[in-house]
Amino acid sequence: MWFEFDLEKSKQKFSKIKVNNKFWDYNFALPQINDKFFVSLGEGGTPCRRSKQFGEKLGINNLFFKDETQNPTNSFKDRAAALLISHAKSWDFHKIICASNGNQGASLAAYTSVEGMNCLNIIPKIIDVGKKAQMIAYNSDIKIVGETVDDAIDYILKIKDFENSYQCTPELNPLTLEAQKTIAYEIINQIKIPNWVIIPMGSGELLVSLWKGFNELKNLNMIDHVPKLIGVQSQSSSPIVNEFLKDFERKIEIQGKNTSMALGILVKKPIYKELAIKCIKESEGTVIAAPEELILSSIEELIRDEGIFAEPSSALTLAAVQLLDQKLLFEPKDNVVCLITGSGFKAPYILEAISSQTKTIGKGSIIITKLKILAQISLSSIKGITGTEIKTTMETISLAAIYQHLKELETKGLISRKKEGKNVLYFITDSGKKVLDALDVLITLL
């Protein structure tokens, strides 16, 4: 179920949107909320960059990366958080609740924090540590339920104690689709109509969101066709891909124990499975399950060739480009867009990769610890983070050692501090951001 609008009245407003638009510039195409309730941290308007090197290597002249890591908390879910929290405010809710496997919970924690609202995140045990760290830093309450997000959603559906809270679980609130469809609007505004859009799939709601956005523009005759959508999952967890391929008797053999490095899309019972498949077929698109071993190499290629540090779920889109290009799916003139949904700083894999490549173990360990601390501070850059909150996500190091690292990072000008009551909050500086941006160089050198 989703919202339907009379968008014909808004056709002229679409034509006036500029390339550097932001999320709320599309408020005329969203569920109507009084603008006095709008909440924003500067989300939307993310770049759709032409490939610097990788497209040329493959012979795809028009390969683009829609980089959602440029949002305030470094993921596409900031769009949903802006709309959901604004809607909650307009209904005079002071508490929100969300079951998620990371990005949505992290975004909501940040947006509720700046609005002084209470946030309860129901999360599974299996979650990227950086996303959990963001929730903690933004003072979200956390309850851990089950192994995967499916367990968290089941829990939230059964418990009746949340009736006074606004429901922000992405699979249970259709406003999530409305917020995320703005990614499609931006792509059309930035590069016109792509031939293919490659999207990582967990529950399938992101793909459905983009289909809805493209389809609305088609119904307004602003584009003459919907781009072909490609849904990608890991071979280790590919329920939507397997259902799509069922009629072709090409079911993917699940690797391992149905887990994946791509924790952001680790969903065993995707609520949007059938609708996602319908959207893919209507767009004349396809699906692919990428081998798990391609994830790390794709992350490194994105860093080295494109300057994008993507989380594992996002790196699957690059793996999909390579695999589908080998199957001769793309023409050289095709416009192909890979959706990069979240930052690699939310997952520790690249930092661990640097550690494994370090020749001097002692020195390498110190570098990795400092990089991890710097990454955690970066993820909490809106509100700042305390040393104790950093310790919560780094259990193998003492609090005293963390404060020593913080002192050294501050001395080097990579972080700054601010006293707030009894707490000392740490923020990343421009110099610190440059260090993190240079991770591709570190991976090469160490």
Image (spheres, rainbow, N blue to C red):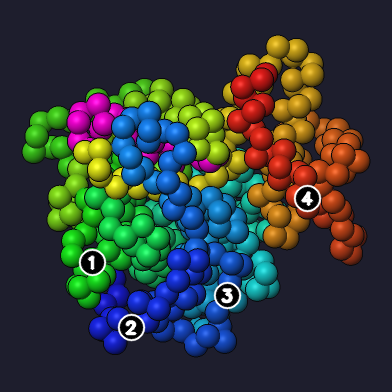
| Kind of residue sitting beneath label 2 | Gln
Specify the principal SS of the magenta part: helix
Residue pointed to by mark 1: 223
* Camera-nearest residue between 276 and 339: 339
| Kind of residue sitting beneath label 4 | Thr
Disc number placed over residue 39 in the picture, else none: 3
Q: Is residue 121 left or right of residue 435?
A: left
Q: CA distance from mark 2 to mark 1?
A: 14 Å
Above or below 343: residue 220? below
Precedes in sequence: disc 4 or disc 2: 2
Q: CA distance from mark 4 to mark 3?
A: 25 Å
Residue 24 in view here: yes
Precedes in sequence: disc 4 or disc 3: 3
Residue pointed to by mark 2: 12
- Residue located farthest toward the top when viewing the structure as drawn: 359
Residue at horizontal 28 percent and vertical 53 percent from the top: 194
Q: CA distance from mark 3 to mark 1?
A: 30 Å
Q: Quadrant of the C terminus?
A: top right
Q: Is residue 97 left or right of residue 330?
A: right
Q: Quadrant of the N terminus?
A: bottom left
Above or below 209: residue 399? above
Packing grade of label 2 (10 A; few <14, some 14-19, many >=20) is: few
* Camera-nearest residue between 236 and 373: 373
SS at badge 2: helix
The image quarter in which residue 28 lies: bottom left
Disc number placed over residue 429 in the picture, else none: 4
